[in-house]
Amino acid sequence: MTKPRVLFYVQYLQGVGHLVRALQIARAMAEAGLEVDLVSGGVPVPGLDAGDARFHQLTPIKCRDGDFSDLTGADGRPLDGTFKNFRRDELLSLFARRRPDAVIIEAFPFGRRQMRFELLPLLEMAQSASPGPLLICSLRDILQVSAKPGRVAETLDMIGRFFDHVLVHGDPSFAALGETFGGADEISDKIHYTGLVTGSPRSVEVSRGQSDGEVLVSAGGGGTQSEILLAAAVAARPLSGARDRPWRLLAGPNLPQDEFAKLEALAPGGVTLERNRDDFAALLAGCAVSVSQAGYNTVTDLLRCGCRSVVVPYCARGETEQLYRARRLGEMGLARVVEEAELGPETLASAIDAVLEAPPPEPAGIDLQGAGKSASLVSAWLRG
């Protein structure tokens, strides 16, 4: 019997969190017996594991200096009409070859509006196909709040015109979509909460306690001004009661080499500086305290591992998503929050000491089965 086919599109522009979440869902769908084509439009990331899903790399697009409106190719040149037409044709050709039974688009139309030049033609081609595939949006729970007039109405119009379902990768007991998207009630019949998408809990359990009770400072992909957090952590160490513990700094693959070299020069004995680690969840499970930003994937790992945490949400360029998530963690007693404007060696050391003296957090039943539940929902719709 032919397996139902899914085409899953994801475009990341800076941090790799969107791609990591999509990979986790794609692997779960493949394990559920679906034939999955995961299509990435961002800069290639070495060593990613798509499991039994097929991975397709489009000609890459990124943003310049954290400005999501300033798109370039991998070589840093601005996109022109020829480039956009080439990318569009790459995507449409893949759709025509694979003839999927479902198309999942990550973020759009709630985000990634910069990619309309290829996503609207894809949606129109899908709608004109016979039989037409299911059209599904894959969405994180907390969105960037937009002050632009008409943005909510535009998004609702797109959902109404094209999409059958909206998978919200969150637990409404932690954050409901309506808290950051004002039109959620109008599409409530299409919204399905999956729980938060996390990795496998087995990797945490088998390695728990193996990282020496260290202070673990992580910077995600290494973009978004993460060097400020890492430098503050180095300066905070001698001020903290945890100064005699080992400290490990994970700078991320996207931190520029000159910034990495500066941190290497600053780091004293007892501080290990690395780019990234494949066993990040295991390190979290065994650390004394985690210090990080508050991106979706990092926070889901914190909740899964149950470690003491200090979070410093990224807020530059008017970003609100991490700040909202961090404050919710603080309200629920799941992390200590140091806001970016307050970050300094003294405030960070004080926060680390405070969480070390507190009992470990309890995630209070937050649903962390988002990858598996996403796969179950899509599988049921396709086999229904």
Image (cartoon, rainbow, N blue to C red):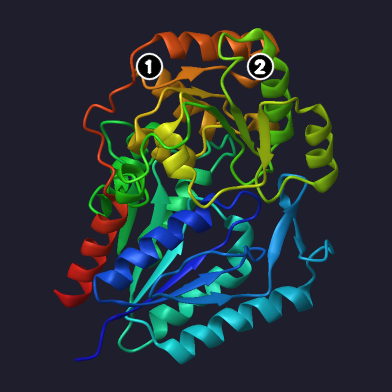
Residue type at mark 2 is Arg
Q: Is residue 12 left or right of residue 268?
A: left
Comes first in the chain, label 1 or label 2: 2
At horizontal 33% and vertical 89% (from top left) the residue drawn is 130
Give the amino acid at mark 1: Glu
x and y percent of residue 292 in the render?
A: 55, 30
**Identity of the residue drawn at 57% across and 28% down:** 313
In the rendered image, residue 374, in percent from the top left (x then y), is placed at 28, 58
**Picture quarter containing residue 33?**
bottom left
Residue 179, placed above or below residue 354: below
Q: Is residue 175 above or below residue 189?
A: above
Q: Residue at x 57, y 17 (%)?
A: 338
Q: Nearer the viewer, residue 242 or 14?
A: 242
Category of crowding for the residue at label 1, using alpha-carbon neighbours closer than 10 angstroms: few (below 14), some (14–19), many (at least 20): few
Q: Horizontal placement of 49 versus 224: left or right?
A: left
Label 2: element kind: helix
Location of mark 2 (residue): 237
- At mark 1, the secondary structure is helix
Looking at the image, can residue 182 be seen? no
* Whether residue 337 can be seen here: yes
Asked which quadrant contains residue 302, the reply is top left
Camera-side residue of 227 and 271: 271
| Mark 2: few/some/many CA within 10 Å (<14, 14-19, 20+) | many
> In the rendering, at what x and y percent does residue 346 appear?
66, 8
Residue under numbered circle 1: 331
Tell me the quarter of the image containing the C terminus: bottom left
